[in-house]
Image (tube, helix red, strand yellow):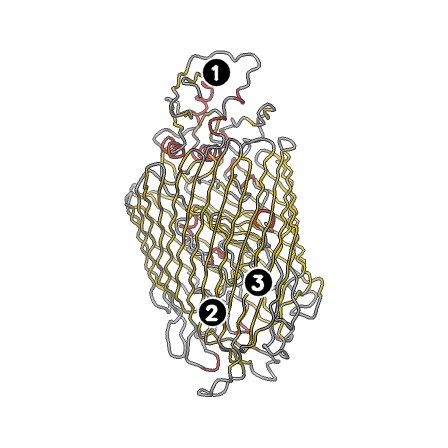
Amino acid sequence: MPKSITLRFTLAAILCAIASASYAGPTTSWSVDVPEGDLAAALRTLARDTGAQFVYAMNQVQGVRTRGAHGKYTAAEAVSKLLEGTGLRVMSDESGAMLILSGSADLDVQPAVPLTRGENTESRFRIAQGASPNSRDRYPLNAATGTRAEQTDVKQVVKIPEITVSAQKRDERAFDVPISIVAMSADELEKRKATSIDELSSSIPGLFIDSNGGGFARAISLRGVSNNFGNSSLIGLYLDEASVASFPAPLQPDLRTYDLARVEVLRGPQGTLYGEGSVGGTIRFITRAPELDKVAAHADVSALFTQDGTPGQHFEGILNAPVVDGKLGLRIAGAYEHDGGWIDGSTTEDFNDQNLKDVRLKALWLPGPGFAVSATSVIHRNNAGSNNGEDRNGDYSQAFNLTTTPTVEDDYNLHNLTLTYDFSRIQVLSATSYIDQDRVARNTGRRFQATPPDVLPAFHVYTPQANTHNSVFTEELRVMSTDTSLLQWTVGAFYRDARFSSDTLSVHFGLPGPPGTPLPPPIGPFEGENSSKSWAAFADIGIDITRKLTFGVGLRYFEDDQEFTSSFAGFATPIQTGTFDALNPRAYMRYRVTPNVNTYASAAKGFRSGGFNSATLPTYDPENVWTYELGAKMYLLDGQLSAEAALFYTDYTDYQIVGVRLDHPEFGNITSNAGSVAIKGVEWTFTWKPADEWILSFNGNYIDSEFYEIAVASSYAIGDSLDFSSKYGGTASAQRDFTWWGRSGFVRVDYDRRGRATFRNRSIGPWYFSESDIVRLLNANFGLQFTDTFSVGVFARNLLNDRGFVSPASIEGVAPRARPRTIGIEFGVSF
């Protein structure tokens, strides 16, 4: 930039007049939540949220990265936060319009002078201001620069808060992304009191998490793509840029939501950008970045009281500290949770309590312009009793009438290093991650109805101790465009080295006798180790065909080299090796019918790798999922109402199932490919803001799944629906913000209803079938900010005290029920 920037055209005066008409004023404070990332995208987000106007030269902000802004700020304070460490600054006049300048530039606003003939303002300046979602469409494309002017009609300011997401590996409004996305901001997570990944399922229809609590097995399904078996996840799981999905399907890590910027749930296959395992979708936890210019701390302390259970206590704290002002900072978020139990065993009351410790450390270093280094470590420790096996009376009966109670230790360490360098028009990113996960489950028991109930009672299965260990190393290198030209692209490569081992000392199997009867002789021990080294290369390209029509394609090639070995009763089986590969394409079309109505159509493939049984049994093939989707996103009533809907059809082939081989010396589990399933579904989201202090929402889904082909004798028959997935679900929420004696507060109510899910195994017999209950959960939360540094809240979970089974596995005696009515009080302090 030259030393003096002279604005010599009438546009400056016009923009100032527009800004003064729409801008609330320089002293108005706003709740700002702008993520780190591309500066131009951040300025657009801030303009939409505050109604302020920013004018800047496009070549100044190209490739510039911001650390974001989070908190209560005026528009001027917020933009100053965004510009920290960028070498840019902001100046404004009495109208409220703000100009972004280089740190050494002076501003001289001259009287209006006509433009030189042929001069194009779009090539010199960009205007970001409060806008409706039509900003990309109402103004023409500048063929010389490949950019569009972004001046819009401020009379249609969107009143519903928008969330910027990075679902396609770049910062975009959720409205613009041709994917069905549920994005929850930090504010919504807090006001829903959603503290863990398990609790997201009661907020997002179509998301089903089969968890026995306390770190026991946790399997995630989405859009009916559900399977508790197989050797990898069906749903991708990310913490920032770190892929943390576990090796076996039902052992996903317990991620916590404290001090997050947002959670993104991407529905449908994400095989192109997120790879193997993102078959039904991907869940992304985006953490807050350190602030490099101030020391800040916050703590929340709460007490919880569960009906017919023992009290619990939660403590959550945040410390933000700059080490080198504007260059290096640390952010620590920690949680300690003691959740009181409520299930009574034969000798122990309320044994399913939980003691959890989770600490996340994040460092951000900005060594130079455009270069950012982010390092994250998570230490997670959990010692808990299991929620499984609770009967209708709230009691637990151990297998073989034993007096032991099930417990689990669930520990993991997660580390990530992300390097980002922004050039003028591209960004290069390297993300290196490692997760090390250990589980020790003790005294687990279940029932096994091997014969019809009128022939014999259920056999009992008792496992004194089972150990599992996962270690997963991943590296992703990605290059992507960052300008606003017609063509946007991403290319990258991915490498994963994963190892999983299991060690079960013994299993006791048989019919129970009277109390005091000796256990049946042990079977085992069982040992197994599976290693996988996989790599992938991918590309995704989107092009604006016209101002309204965008077309995109993507492709990912995946190759997985696996090695498997096992032993039974000390006898090792031969080592098995194999290679599995897949080509995962994606194609989409986005069409803006009007500035406030965005439609899309897509076809995408997801993939899950195959694996091995013991050496005497055959291997099983990969699973493949094709999903075809039509969707629409729109703003109505001048932005007070947002509506989204999606129709989808999924072809799920080579479905992996586990059958039982009682004739096999290893007591018979065999994984095979059962056949093919058709899934048809619809999902919708409505959010209405009838007034500034109110926000209402209604989300729902309906899924119909059916096996249309059976490849081998298996757990299913033609016409059966998929297990572990509710047929329908719906949530309704109402939030009222208020001011009471000058103090701000809110009241929020959330209601969730989910349909039944099934569990069957026809390889055992037609009697082997059970269902979950229709579960109705009503939660409420009240908060009041007494001062700038002190808040108090009262919350309630499961106010209706619905005690239905949330899992369909009651036939095995391992189905948990909803936690009883729980009331809590919370205090928050900021420093």
Tell me the tag on residue 467: 2
Q: Is residue 138 visible?
A: yes
The amino acid marked with disc number 3 is Asn
Is 597 rendered above or below residue 152? below
Q: Nearer the viewer, residue 38 or 505?
A: 505
Q: Between marks 1 and 2, how big is the CA–CA gap?
A: 73 Å
Q: Residue at x 66, y 65 (%)?
A: 673
Q: Nearer the viewer, residue 70 or 485?
A: 485
The amino acid marked with disc number 2 is Asn
Tell me the tag on residue 231: 3
550 lies left or right of 81: right
Tell me the tag on residue 10: 1
Count residues near mark 2 (Cα–Cα under 10 Å), then give few for <14, some for 14-19, many for 20+. Answer: some
Q: Earlier in the sequence, mark 3 or mark 2?
A: 3
Count residues near mark 1 (Cα–Cα under 10 Å), then give few for <14, some for 14-19, many for 20+. Answer: some
Q: Nearer the viewer, residue 611 or 772?
A: 611
User: x, y percentage for residue 780?
Assistant: 41, 55
Q: Earlier in the sequence, mark 1 or mark 2?
A: 1
Q: Is residue 819 visible?
A: no
Q: Secondary structure at mark 3?
A: loop
Count residues near mark 3 (Cα–Cα under 10 Å), then give few for <14, some for 14-19, many for 20+. Answer: many
Quadrant of residue 414 within the rendered picture = bottom left
Q: Residue at x 52, y 33 (%)?
A: 132
Q: Secondary structure at mark 1?
A: loop
User: x, y percentage for residue 66?
Assistant: 43, 36
